[in-house]
């Protein structure tokens, strides 16, 4: 109730400040529709079981949802919309993936209940429909969502009922038999729905191997010291403690947790446990490591809210469940009367701080795994680590890993986005001919957009590739704007947008975006990208002295980057530095390398405005670069 009140009181989300939107554009952003496979799962006899043992049943339900349903969803590329105490709503881009996940889950439950007495076993029903959904932020709704929910009520315990739309999409593509049930009259659904019951053979669906894993300890138990593994980085945000002494501040505390959960859910590589599961711990003293084991997540975020006069103090900590050590901790403070602004500021500051810390640990974990056990996700993380080195040979190695990743998972949008980035890097950072990288880069960008849907990172990388390699900056910018709407706290998206603004000649906007990115992450390992972008914006605005000041910052971090050194040469030359000083820098920076000819550099600047190309080329020619 408090969270619903909070949602009504808060203003509608506005567009990012760097892009003005008309009111109808904002309306469209909040009334999007898309085709989706909708899976509805619910427990059978849960109320009766809770009547016998409420706390034990809640713990077991959470165990099943987070150790069996969540891994099935992650493995098949689904998105958890919400988990309640005894079920959940999940969205998939593919009906095949949705039904596969449902069978995986039900098969895992068969194994989980093998030794349970019949009257105490927890069993789920599932309904699946393919249809049009209305997107409202992180939620979906509409008649077709209701159809999935009503189909679930028609399923037998442990069974799955699908609609004709799903049958048409999956027939002949899965090892399952679809038994016709005829037209069903479903409650509050105006038209009859032709339905099918799904039957499968257990040997064809080994599902998620939970039998060999340590089971999560039920609430109140000390059994099981090893967390159950999950294929993806995962985090639970526990209810923050309201230590203000004012129960009326509960709405703020709960709203803050919901905001943080929603923002973290936008990160494509991070699985976030829905609030419905984590709020089961509200009001209880909990141990983060124990909760992590129960929810089968690798990280747990805890926090508290205190009151001092008319100010609130909010502290937070991320615990690594594997080690028990803190991964991140910080605190924030703000005026009580600005409670909604404070809530937004905390969320926008906390996400850029947490995400790189978690990603770094995940990369280290992936690199520590033996090669023979790699999955597509681990390959992706290894490639990401290689790209952070910003070395030509590392870029080649990353491409090899990513191609293997998309062979394992042809719908891995994040991997396609990273492949597009590799081709951009080869063209613009190592100064390879752009023509050689254009076709494979744009194909990867196309696949990233096709498979990415709501994956902000994949869409952004695709948009950046389209802008540079495709020489279509306006089209690329549209994808980047959408990505920023999906994840407004992403450093990389801001930096991509800054670069594209430079391409379009909107240098004031480029400076604004890059400076914002530095406020988010001035100590980030790739801050040099922002320094380079700022230097280029000043150069094209003919502020050559400022350009030199910023390019020196980039050069101090990445002297091996071709585009950084070339920009330094252009800035020195355009600033009328003495010719011998320019030659000395060139000699020192190049070492045994050779300067690229101007024609090669010009070929990789086609996405820029002609006036900016000529300004840059004139400075390089003046510095003595060969034609």
Image (tube, rainbow, N blue to C red):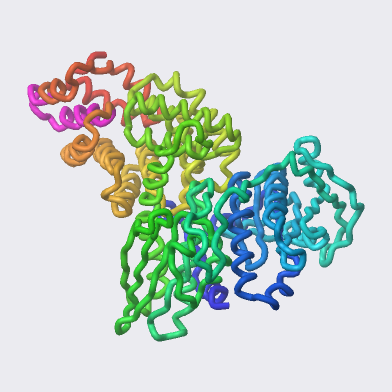
Residue shown at the point (55%, 39%) measured from the top left: 413
Residue 289 quadrant? bottom left
* Front-most of residues 184 and 13: 184
Q: Position of residue 400 (x, y in %)?
A: 46, 26
The residue segment tinted magenta is 563-582
**Horizontal and vertical percent position of residue 586:** 16, 23
- Whether residue 570 is in magenta: the answer is yes
Residue 100, percent from left and from top: 70, 44
Q: Is residue 258 above or below residue 231?
A: below
Q: Quadrant of the C terminus?
A: top left
Judged left or right of residue 424, residue 445 is: right
Query: Which residue appears at 39% of the width and 73% of the height?
Result: 304
Q: Is the residue 122 above or below the residue 432 in the image?
A: below
Residue 474 in view, yes or no: no
Q: Quadrant of the N terminus?
A: bottom right
Q: Which residue is at 48% across, 35% downward?
A: 379
Left/right of residue 390 with respect to residue 130 in the rendered view: left
Inspect the magenta stretch and tell me whether residue 437 lies in it.
no
As drawn, 577 above or below 159: above
Please provide percent x and percent y for residue 380: 47, 37
Q: Quadrant of residue 171?
A: top right
Answer left or right for 378 relative to 113: left
Nearer-the-camera pick, 159 or 139: 159
Q: Inspect this view and state whether residue 586 appears.
A: yes
- Residue farthest toward the right in the current orientation of the protein: 182
């Amino acid at each position: 109730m408090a969270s619903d009140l909070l949602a009504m009181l808060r203003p509608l989300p506005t567009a990012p400040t760097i892009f003005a939107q008309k009111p109808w554009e904002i309306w469209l952003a909040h009334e999007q529709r898309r085709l989706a496979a909708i899976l509805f799962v619910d427990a059978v006899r849960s109320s009766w079981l809770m009547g016998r043992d409420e706390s034990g049943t809640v713990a077991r339900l959470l165990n099943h949802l987070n150790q069996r349903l969540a891994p099935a969803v992650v493995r098949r590329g689904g998105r958890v919309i919400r988990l309640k105490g005894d079920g959940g709503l999940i969205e998939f881009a593919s009906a095949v993936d949705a039904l596969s996940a449902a069978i995986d889950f039900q098969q895992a439950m068969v194994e989980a209940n093998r030794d349970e007495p019949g009257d105490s076993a927890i069993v789920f029903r599932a309904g699946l429909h393919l249809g049009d959904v209305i997107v409202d932020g992180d939620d979906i709704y509409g008649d077709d969502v209701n159809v999935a929910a009503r189909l679930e009520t028609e399923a037998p315990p442990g069974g799955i009922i699908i609609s004709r739309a799903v049958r048409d999409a999956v027939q002949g593509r899965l090892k399952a038999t679809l038994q016709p049930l005829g037209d069903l009259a479903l409650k509050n659904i105006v038209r009859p729905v032709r339905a099918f019951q799904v039957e499968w053979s257990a040997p064809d669906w080994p599902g998620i191997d939970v039998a060999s894993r340590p089971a999560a300890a039920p609430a109140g138990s000390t059994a099981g010291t090893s967390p159950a593994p999950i294929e993806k980085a995962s985090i639970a945000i526990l209810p923050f403690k309201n230590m203000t002494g004012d129960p009326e501040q509960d709405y703020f505390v709960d709203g803050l947790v919901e905001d943080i959960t929603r923002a973290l859910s936008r990160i494509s590589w991070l699985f976030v446990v829905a609030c419905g599961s984590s709020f089961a711990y509200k009001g209880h003293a909990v141990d983060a490591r124990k909760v992590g084991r129960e929810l089968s997540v690798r990280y747990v975020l805890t926090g508290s809210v205190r009151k001092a006069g008319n100010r609130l103090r909010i502290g937070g900590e991320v615990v690594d469940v594997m080690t028990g050590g803190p991964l991140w901790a910080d605190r924030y403070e703000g005026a009580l009367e600005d409670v909604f602004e404070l809530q937004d500021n905390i969320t926008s500051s906390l996400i850029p701080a947490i995400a790189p810390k978690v990603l770094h640990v995940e990369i280290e974990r992936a690199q520590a795994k033996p090669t023979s056990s790699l999955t597509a996700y681990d390959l992706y993380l290894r490639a990401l680590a290689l790209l952070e080195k910003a070395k030509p040979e590392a870029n080649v190695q990353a491409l090899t890993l990513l191609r293997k990743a998309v062979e394992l998972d042809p719908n891995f949008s994040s991997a396609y986005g990273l492949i597009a980035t590799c081709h951009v890097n080869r063209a613009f950072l190592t100064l390879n001919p752009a023509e050689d990288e254009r076709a494979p880069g744009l194909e990867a960008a196309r696949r990233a957009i096709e498979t990415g849907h709501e994956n902000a990172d994949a869409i952004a990388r695709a948009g950046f590739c389209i802008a540079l390699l495709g020489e279509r900056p306006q089209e690329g910018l549209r994808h980047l704007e959408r990505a920023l709407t999906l994840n407004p706290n992403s450093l990389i998206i801001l930096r991509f947008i800054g670069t594209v603004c430079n391409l379009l000649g909107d240098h004031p906007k480029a400076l604004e975006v890059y400076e914002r990115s530095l406020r988010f992450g001035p100590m980030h390992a790739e801050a040099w990208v922002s320094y380079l972008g700022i230097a280029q914006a000043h150069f094209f605005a003919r502020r050559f002295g400022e350009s030199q000041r910023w390019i020196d910052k980039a050069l101090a971090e990445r002297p091996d980057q071709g585009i950084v050194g070339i920009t330094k040469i252009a800035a020195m030359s355009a600033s009328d530095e003495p010719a011998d000083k320019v030659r000395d820098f060139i000699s020192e920076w190049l070492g045994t390398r050779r300067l690229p000819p101007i024609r090669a550099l010009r070929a990789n600047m086609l996405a820029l405005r002609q006036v900016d190309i000529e300004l840059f080329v004139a400075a390089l020619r003046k510095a003595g670069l060969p034609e």
